Image (cartoon, rainbow, N blue to C red):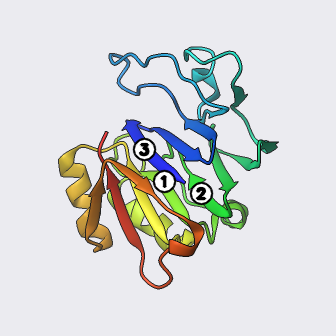
Amino acid sequence: MTITWQGDNYFKLKAGNITVVLNPYSLDKKTSVSKTKGELVLFTDASQSSKAKIDEESFVIDGPGEYENKDVFVYGHQINGNVVYLLISEDIKIAFLGEYGHQELSDSDLELLEDSDILILPVGGGELTTAKEASKIIRQVEPRIVIPSCFNSAQLNDFIKEIGVKPEELDKFSIKKKDLPQEDIKLVVLKA
């Protein structure tokens, strides 16, 4: 599996010959996003799905529920107006929190997300999760790999200090189930 970051909260996951696109839109309202092509396209904010330019053959998910498409399993769970997702592909569990805010994770939220192999979450604060809140979520979920989103360099530095893990900066992140870290959490910072 390969994960790339397109900026803000927009990611692409490539698993075999399947592309999963997460939140193909810009949060700043100024940056335009070109037409998106992927077998699966997920939105944590359902209002964005009607505005995005998506290939008409894509399978769009923008709400809670259980989905399966081309060997990718998706579980969506509503938390305060946004949907968080657990994706399972190539036997790797990915928790994607989208535009997660300042709320606590409840026990039912954790039932879905805990023991995820990879956790993608915002860390920049403002309307989204702060570095301190993200650190608490990481301790609750206990992922093996953390990928931050929605940050500038100062916010990223605050987050790195908060969790105390040296980041690995990459253009794209490739991983197989057998290569997941077993002991320590790995922090992967992707370049947009």
Q: Counting other residues with Cα less than 10 Å from the Cα at mark 1, is it few (<14), some (14-19), or many (20 or more)?
A: many
Residue located 55% across and 44% down the image: 14
Residue 168: give x, y in percent of width and height. Answer: 29, 63
Q: In this view, does 175 lie to the left or right of 112?
A: left
In this rendering, position of residue 150 left or right of residue 87: left
Whether tag 1 and tag 2 are in contact, CB under 8 A, the answer is: yes
Q: Give the residue pinned by disc 3.
A: 4
The quadrant in which the C terminus is found is top left
Q: How far is disc 1 from disc 3 in space, using C-alphas?
A: 12 Å
Q: Please identify, in this view, whether the residue under mark 1 or under mark 3 is nearer the observer.
A: 3
Image point 60% across, 38% down: which residue? 19
Q: Nearer the viewer, residue 97 or 128?
A: 97
Give whichever of discs 1 and 3 has the lower sequence position.
3
List the single residue furthest toward the bottom: 183
First in sequence: mark 2 or mark 3?
Answer: 3
Q: In this view, does 127 lie to the left or right of 86?
A: left
Residue 134 location, quadrant: bottom left
Quadrant occupied by the N terminus: bottom right
User: Dot 2: what SS?
Assistant: strand
Circles 2, 3 touching at the beta carbon (< 8 Å): no
Q: Position of residue 15 (x, y in %)?
A: 60, 48
Residue type highlighted by circle 3: Thr
Residue underneath mark 2? 94
Amino acid type, callout 1? Ile
Mark 1: which secondary structure? Answer: strand
Please give the residue where the numbered disc 1 appears in the rendered image. 120
The answer for how far apart the CA atoms under marks 1 and 2 are is 8 Å
Give the amino acid type for the residue marked by disc 2 in the picture: Ile
Q: How many marks?
A: 3
